[in-house]
Image (spheres, rainbow, N blue to C red):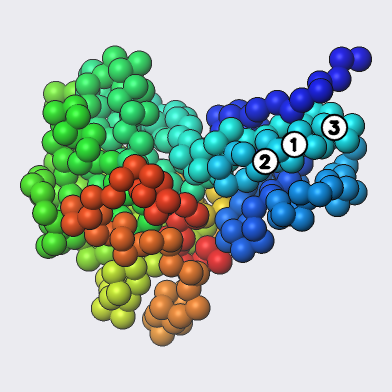
Amino acid sequence: MDISTEPSMMTAKELTRIVLASEELFILDVRNASDFNDWRIEGDGTEIINIPYFELLDSVDAALDRIPAGKKVLVVCAKEGSSQFIAEQLVEAGRTHVHYLEGGMKSWSEHLEPVKIGDLRDGGSVYQFVRIGKGCLSYMVISGGEAAVIDTLRLTDVFEQFARAQGAVIKHTLDTHLHADHISGGRTLAERTGATYWLPPKDADEVTFSYEKLEEGRDITVGGTKIQIQPVYSPGHTIGSTSFMVDDRYLFTGDILFIESIGRPDLAGKAEDWVSDLRNTLYNRYKELSQELTVLPAHFGKVTELGESGRVMARLSDLYLRNPGLNIRDEGAFRRTVTENLPPQPNAYQEIRQTNMGKLLPSEDEQREMEIGPNRCAVHDK
């Protein structure tokens, strides 16, 4: 049997495929315990342990004792170097099937995996871009050779390349709200492609750039007049939060409604002011819509929200049956749920908001560092 004498590099894309397929994988995370406890790789088929790098420098025996023999092993660290070194030591100690993650957790945070959600009645399609390492979701609606990108992430090359491969020209980029957990790529993508950038005006009081006002009643067409993106004003996560209905079958809910939770109202420091808006959107406004709509949120918080091929989606009626945030009858209890004992706020969320307003211009490395960690936009993501 041919036994490798050195570890193999695994890309974030390869790791994503393993996670989405629920394949068995044993992960040794050598970051500091605080970083590991804050944010880690998760999957139905993965088993993970944390032994900080400095504890393995002299000997990897502590890891050998805890890694099952014969299993595929992936060593991860923040940037790659430490994990490669430890992986090499494991191989020297006689372990096989050992890998290290290319680019470390930074590359895991930035990988986007496109999955097809479904078709449109005119022959167009909807695609979801799963940022599995951070829990962010972007979308592309394609119809008649044109495309609209919803809640664009800053990794704009991915959207340009995908649209080109589909034979589509990006005509619109839309943000459901002013994001606080990640840096929006909507304006950058619009500038690069000549598209129109749309933003809810109630979230844009402090922005330093021009944009098209995203308001209810302003239908946006993709592919001539074949497909309409219909804005639905749905405040609560922010005062300007706006959902979109597409083709009378898809509801893009931004950070208002998730598969297993609801949006938090506190990231702009106005939780008490926005609780009533949040409840009205979830318990009244959405109830007026067709319950057959497929909900497509801007984030997921847990791997349990990933469905077939990594899709994050659910029928609105099903969410009213099982989503805990949609089943709090008492208004006082609802207020306490969305304002007290919330998860920690996203990393650098104030700086991210300032960047999305155009007030800060961080470098690429600074943007990457600002986004490290989970999104934490949901009430129940603890």
Question: What amino acid is labelled 1 in the image?
Answer: Ala
Query: How many angstroms separate mark 1 from mark 2 (CA)?
Result: 6 Å
Percent of width and height locating residue 290: 33, 49
Local packing at callout 2 (Cα closer than 10 Å; few below 14, some 14-19, many 20+) is many
Q: Secondary structure at mark 1?
A: helix
Instruction: Tell me the residue that label 2 is attached to.
Output: 83
Instruction: Tell me the residue that label 3 is attached to.
Output: 92
Pointer 1 and pointer 3: residues touching (CB < 8 Å)? no
Q: Residue at x 35, y 16 (%)?
A: 165
**Residue 70 higher or lower than 241, as above or below:** above
Q: Which mark is residue 37?
A: none
Query: How many angstroms separate mark 2 from mark 3 (CA)?
Result: 14 Å
Q: Which mark is residue 87?
A: 1
Local packing at callout 1 (Cα closer than 10 Å; few below 14, some 14-19, many 20+) is many
Q: Residue at x 38, y 44 (%)?
A: 365
Percent of width and height locating residue 267: 34, 68
Question: What amino acid is labelled 2 in the image?
Answer: Ser
Sequence order check, earlier mark of 1 and 3: 1
**Residue 330 higher or lower than 52, as above or below:** below
Percent of width and height locating residue 22: 69, 37
Q: Residue at x 86, y 20 (%)?
A: 3
Q: Nearer the viewer, residue 340 or 110?
A: 110
Pointer 2 and pointer 3: residues touching (CB < 8 Å)? no
Pointer 1 and pointer 2: residues touching (CB < 8 Å)? yes
